[in-house]
Image (cartoon, grey):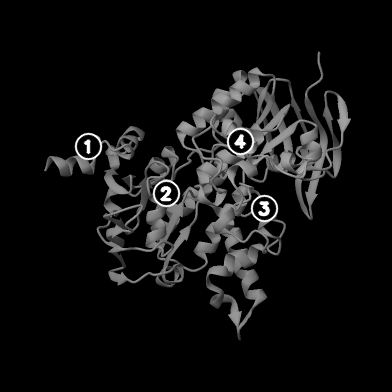
Amino acid sequence: MTEPVLQIRGVSRHFGAVKALTDVEFSLEKGEIHALCGENGAGKSTLMNIIAGVLQPDAGEIRMDGRKVVVSSPSTAQSLGIGLVHQEIALCPDATVAENMYMAATGRRRSFLMNYKALVRDAQAVMDRLARIDVRRKVSELPISSQQLVEIAKALTLDCRVLIFDEPTAALTETEAQVLFGIIRGLKAQGISIIYISHRMAEIFSLCDRVTVFRDGRYVSTEKIAEITPDDVVRRMVGREITRLYPPKLADQDRSEDAVLSVRGLGDDARFADIGFDLKKGEILGIGGLIGSGRTEIAEGICGLRPIKSGEIVLAGARQSIARYADAVAAGIVYLSEDRKGSGLFLDLPIASNISVLDLGQVTRLGLVDKKAEADMARRFAARLGIRMGGIDYPVSSLSGGNQQKVAIAKQLAVGPKVIIMDEPTRGIDVGAKSEIHKLLRELAQSGIGIIVISSELPELLGLCDRVVVIHEGRLAGELVAEDMSEEAVMMLASGVGPAGSRQAADHAA
């Protein structure tokens, strides 16, 4: 028997009082795609950062080919043939795609001058395997999905024996994800070993050879994919049955014709035009469409984050004049960005400061922040959303991705909004936390808060929302209700085809 390419023995890591990892085990064979599963906070990303040299373990050892190694830094990891595609995008926005892809290699160059022509040529050849992105463009000019592809392309430039993918498809379209899966299978065929972290069971069971489960920072089990079911994996992840991922929808007798929010003829003369819909009291309204269709831009327009050239916004019967985000917040409309790291949170500030930041007036006395009032607010929302943390004074960067998302939601709730627009609210969140957030959104809708959800996950869009409007190339393609709602119907509208039974098709027939 040959030694595993990578073996983790008894690794532990603490962050203050929080035990992120306790005596965990993991092994990776040559040419294997090995899934690592667990709820947010289970320790998956912490272990990957230890393997990649970003963090150091408090105890335990790492072995490669049976030999103990010390991965003291990311550069050491790269020299050992270990590459990591981060869940959170970590690129230099003012540098080009090509410069980001070869940044590590550039730092090791001995020559004084860079051959930029060769850099662009080599970078474009790698990028063309994933998508048609001009590597001469600045990263800041790209949407989130394209930035994720740059992260993946950056890893492909390394001469890796072990390649770690941490939630690589969270921001990708289905087409982009399928291209990535083909590349991963090709890497496996070359003998490269893959660690694949994902909450999406369909991906894991179609792509991986084995699956290891962590729970609460501890090792639970390792099984061959052929000998386990998705339900088994979920049960081991959460330690309990997840009987209902989506709460019951609004009953017919509870439906109201009263509009919490009305949008009429909204346009920005660039990305979208003539957008109109009503958000009814007590319902969760979904906005569907392909990535790049204009969904996010519409949300930004409603919230004053993007200039509006035409149309009107009516909140609780009163027309609103929203020129900037502060106007939207004052009116009672808040927006949860799809990019929690870039625009949703202040990662280096304490959890308490992030939760209170949208309305400091609630926790300010005589012009100064009342730390006790701020702490009380933070503890209340942390308990309500189940945020796992060392303390409210810890920086948000110390939290797992799912717990960071919960802090972002708490920040919106802290201002007592009338309408919350959530853009990809459960992106990168595990199945247990998703269930909790879905339940919370339904409770908020029942309490009278208007909820709009933008999601690229069709099961979430259909399972959570009472009604779905679909956007195609910046215009309203149609509306789906009740029995009309299906993945096929959403995709047909999103592609510019009106399915039979949709509100759009009925309007055309009339």
Disc 2 secondary structure class: strand
Decide which of tag 3 and tag 2 comes sooner along the chain: 3
Q: Evaluate whether residue 385 shows in this view.
A: no
The mark lying in front, picked from 3 and 4, is 4
Which corner quadrant of the image does residue 34 belong to? top right
Decide which of tag 3 and tag 1 comes sooner along the chain: 3
Disc 3 secondary structure class: loop
- Reading the image, the residue beneath label 1 is 501
Tell me the quarter of the image containing the C terminus: top left
- Reading the image, the residue beneath label 2 is 454
The disc at residue 368 is none
The disc at residue 123 is 4
What is the CA distance from the residue labelled 3 to the residue labelled 2?
A: 24 Å
Which corner quadrant of the image does residue 328 belong to? bottom left
Horizontally, residue 181 falls left or right of residue 43, namely left
Tell me the quarter of the image containing the N terminus: top right
Residue 477, image x and y in percent?
27, 44
Disc 1 secondary structure class: loop
Residue 182, image x and y in percent?
55, 24
Disc 4 secondary structure class: helix
- Reading the image, the residue beneath label 3 is 399
Q: State whether residue 317 is above or below residue 126.
A: below
Crowding near the residue tagged with mark 4, few <14, some 14–19, many ≥20 C-alpha atoms within 10 Å: many
Decide which of tag 4 and tag 2 comes sooner along the chain: 4
The mark lying in front, picked from 2 and 1, is 2
Q: Check disc 1 and give the amino acid type.
A: Gly
What is the CA distance from the residue labelled 4 to the residue labelled 2?
A: 33 Å
Decide which of tag 3 and tag 4 comes sooner along the chain: 4
> Which residue is rendered at x = 59% and y = 46% of the image?
96
Residue placed most toward the observer, 436 or 272: 272
Q: Check disc 4 and give the amino acid type.
A: Ala
